[in-house]
Image: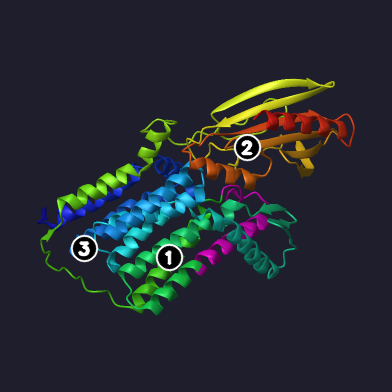
Amino acid sequence: MTIKHANTLFLLQIILLACSLLLYPQIVVDWRTYSFDDGTYSHAYLMPFIIITLLWQQRNNVQLRFNLLFLATTLGLALVLAVSITSQLISLTRLLFPMYVILLFCSLVKPSKGLIVPLALLWFISPVWGSLIGPLQYIAVVITTFFMQLTHIPVYVEGNFVQIPQGVFEIAEGCSGLRYFIVSLALSTLLCHLQLRKVKNMLLVTLCAIFGAILVNGIRIVMIILIGYYSDMQSSIVKDHNMFGWFLYIPFIMALFYLVGKLEPQPTDDNNAYKPQQLSARSSIVVIFMVVACSGLSLRALTNQHPLFSYTPITITPEASSMQPSAYIAAYSNKTLQHLTVNDHEIINIRFEFNGQHEANRPDYYLNEVIPKGWNKVNSDLTATSRLVRLTNLAGEHAILQYWYEANGNSTGSLAVYKRYRIHQAFKLNAYSAMQWQFVLCQTTLCTDEATILTMLATKNHSGQ
């Protein structure tokens, strides 16, 4: 076939990118839940328009060319994605999927420098940046401590808590500055792509954007503490400070734009005439067929576990208000509650089953809490088949809970071992797993008899599998 207009080529690019996304319902659900419904990734709404605009600017420089090596690499990565999706290795999936789209794109389009930034912006949509919360949170505490020591205000810092005479401030995960960090990195990437040509200037702008975002977040926290001190914690900014930081961040971004304008003059607009290109229709058909065959839709069709075209966002189970001790599991496919009596001990036995339909539907989801509300962990022991946790509460009562994970026909109390079982199970195209949770009040502080009973139940379950 012959492509006679650049607009047609551009349309082909957009269709290719859109289809590659829709072929993976799990990715759509994940991005809808965390990239477009989470305030941390609110910039994700703008990214598709920015990517389309940048690709449009490159329409005259892109060349069609079928590349078998890129296609083979794409298919190999699709298999890795199938395993990571089925075994619910969420971080790996979020990291690899943009790479999959880029390789797919390059199987029909000749790679060029002008495509690096537009395609790399896919990583700013993917919610893969959560691992930076911890380090950024620590940096925010260090910056806050440094600036507060320059004031006359008595301050005590312990962990993520900053205490002054008027009250205590927690530098929580939302105060880590991750939003400013991602936005600054994305803006600096765009500025370097559109405005700068020298590598040293690109590095300077990127470093200024990153360190500036971290510093602005630290100054924001310090100013909130100072406002709380001088207003005796009565200012509305202390209670609701989500918008306050952007009034500090916007002037910083304007200064960054000014710096970029001073470093290099505005580049000239290169509007080369578009030359008609030819691409074999057979090549396009091969790419489309192979990608569909190795897609998430094909994976769902083979497993027959979930609706084929299901893009509904994740639904989190509300926390139960019952006074009965129970684990809190954010999402599960089935729950079975039993009350067992063994040697005059009443045991609460709950079985949670997971179908792996979405990212939260697994026992190791980050919102899950195995320790019941109102109880505190004293210690825990890992046995051959389960994990035993000794508990106490403010009323002086003692209890012991036992839980284990089930996957690939095996039971274990180790989260790391359970994940390995889940990976082995993924090669069988099976995403089902379960968690057994048992709780019993102790008649003595040592909980010796209760631990023996629970261990016996776990051993009996393991031998029955």
In the rendered image, which residue does mark 2 sit on? 410
Q: Nearer the viewer, mark 3 or mark 2?
A: 2
Q: Is residue 127 visible?
A: no
Q: Is residue 415 visible?
A: yes
Name above or below for residue 135 compared with residue 451: below
Q: Which residues are magenta?
A: 211-240
Q: CA distance from mark 1 to mark 2?
A: 53 Å
Please, what secondary structure does the residue beneath circle 2 have?
strand
Category of crowding for the residue at label 1, using alpha-carbon neighbours closer than 10 angstroms: few (below 14), some (14–19), many (at least 20): some
Q: Position of residue 341 (x, y in %)?
A: 78, 20
Q: Is residue 284 magenta?
A: no
- Name the amino acid, label 3: Val
Quarter of the figure with the C terminus = top right
Point 35% across, 78% down: residue: 198
Looking at marks 3 and 1 on the same chain, the residue that comes earlier in the sequence is marked by 3
Q: Position of residue 41 (x, y in %)?
A: 45, 50
Point 67% across, 51% down: residue: 233
Point 15% across, 56% down: residue: 279
Looking at marks 3 and 2 on the same chain, the residue that comes earlier in the sequence is marked by 3
In the rendered image, which residue does mark 1 sit on? 253
- Name the amino acid, label 1: Ile
Instruction: Kindly identify which numbered label has been placed on residue 62.
Output: 3
Query: Is 37 or 20 nearer to us in this picture?
Result: 20
Name above or below for residue 438 compared with residue 189: above
